[in-house]
């Protein structure tokens, strides 16, 4: 007899292949682009505001930036970017956390359409609850890496300044340990927690139950989910490189517009790409969750039929 924990492994084979997940993701993206784009405006605008504030802070600390922004230093390398790397990582975290409501509404929208239901996907307390769950998911997955990164920057950098000869081996070991341990653990837990938000919002689960539910629903397909995530991130990365390349050539061709490019056009381009690529993340999450739920329903029906 099939148990509860075994039900997700019985999903339709075409739906749990990389090609099947991506095909459904792009189909949902095409069919529901308007609503998905509206859902992901909040995280895109949130990161846009963060980037504007970050650039204003850097310009206040380094008034000649961006004209002399890339400053080569014998000890620190690219000094300006080193000092703001933590803020850049925090900006990515802001987008990730604020995407909670978008992921929840994406999943609810797809489930409602499959059940033939209509009405608003919004619910009281959905935004704050989803943001809280997404924050817990981020801390759970990337807490080790974030703690190691802060330790490397704050503690290691302090010792490098006061006693560089003795502190460098410790700082180097701490940095290597942070990346060698924190990144693999973060990636694995991110894939494991891929369905935390739809599980918490659609099934009204508490945090611990939502994490357990996501772990159960992603069992057996995590490597395929990782491949899908990498495809979406690669697409976003390629588009980002094209935007940076285009804006860099624009700034070189029009030096008087360098500040405009740095402080407005570049954050605006990133915001646009976040708004356009975020729905792919929402479509992938909603599609996978809907398929896993459907697999459970079909499996339950089969179990009842066999038991009779």
Image (tube, rainbow, N blue to C red):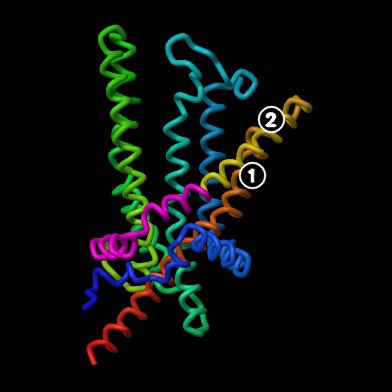
Comes first in the chain, label 2 or label 1: 2
Percent x, y of residue 7: 29, 72
Front in this rendered view, residue 174 or 56: 174
Q: Residue 268 carries which label?
A: 1
**What is the count of numbered marks?**
2
Per the rendered image, the range of residues in magenta is: 208-231
| Residue 107 appears in the picture as rendered | yes
Q: Mark 2 points at which residue?
A: 248
| Residue 38 appears in the picture as rendered | no
Q: Examine the structure image and report whether residue 17 is included in the region drawn in magenta.
A: no
Front in this rendered view, residue 13 or 238: 13
Q: Is the magenta stretch mostly helix, strand or loop?
A: helix
Q: Which element carries disc 2, helix, strand or loop?
A: helix
Percent x, y of residue 272: 63, 49
Front in this rendered view, residue 80 or 63: 80
Residue at the image position 32 percent from the left and 49 percent from the top: 189
Query: Which residue is farthest right?
Result: 253
Q: Examine the structure image and report whether residue 223 is included in the region drawn in magenta.
A: yes
Q: Which element carries disc 1, helix, strand or loop?
A: helix
Q: Would you say 248 lies left or right of 10 here?
A: right
Front in this rendered view, residue 295 or 88: 295
Q: Would you say 289 lies left or right of 119 here?
A: left
Percent x, y of residue 11: 38, 70
Mark 1: few/some/many CA within 10 Å (<14, 14-19, 20+): some
Query: Which residue is farthest bottom?
Result: 308
Relative to 252, say whether 247 is above or below.
below
């Amino acid at each position: 007899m099939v148990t509860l924990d075994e039900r997700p492994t019985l999903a339709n084979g075409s739906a749990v292949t990389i090609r099947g997940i991506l095909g459904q993701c792009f189909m949902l993206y095409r069919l529901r682009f308007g609503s998905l784009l509206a859902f992901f405006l909040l995280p895109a605008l949130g990161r846009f505001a963060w980037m504007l504030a970050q650039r204003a802070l850097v310009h206040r600390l380094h008034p000649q930036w961006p004209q002399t922004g890339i400053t080569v230093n014998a000890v620190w390398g690219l000094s300006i970017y080193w000092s703001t790397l933590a803020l850049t990582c925090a900006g990515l975290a802001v987008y990730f956390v604020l995407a909670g409501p978008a992921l929840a509404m994406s999943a609810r929208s797809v489930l409602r359409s499959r059940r033939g239901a209509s009405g608003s996907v919004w619910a009281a307390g959905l935004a704050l609850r989803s943001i809280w769950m997404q924050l817990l998911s981020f801390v759970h997955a990337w807490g080790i890496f974030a703690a190691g990164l802060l330790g490397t920057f704050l503690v290691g950098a302090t010792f490098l300044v006061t006693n560089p000869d003795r502190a460098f081996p410790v700082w180097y070991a701490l940095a290597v340990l942070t990346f060698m341990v924190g990144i693999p653990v973060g990636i694995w837990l991110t894939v494991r927690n891929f369905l935390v938000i739809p599980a918490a919002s659609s099934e009204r689960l508490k945090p611990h139950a939502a994490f357990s539910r996501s772990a159960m629903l992603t069992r057996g397909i995590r490597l395929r989910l990782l491949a899908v995530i990498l495809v979406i991130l690669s697409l976003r990365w390629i588009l980002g490189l094209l935007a940076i390349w285009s804006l860099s050539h624009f700034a070189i061709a029009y030096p008087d517009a360098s500040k405009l490019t740095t402080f407005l056009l570049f954050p605006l381009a990133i915001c646009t790409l976040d708004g356009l690529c975020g729905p792919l993340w929402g479509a992938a999450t909603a599609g996978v969750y809907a398929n896993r739920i459907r697999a459970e329903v079909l499996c339950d029906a089969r179990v009842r039929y066999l038991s009779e």
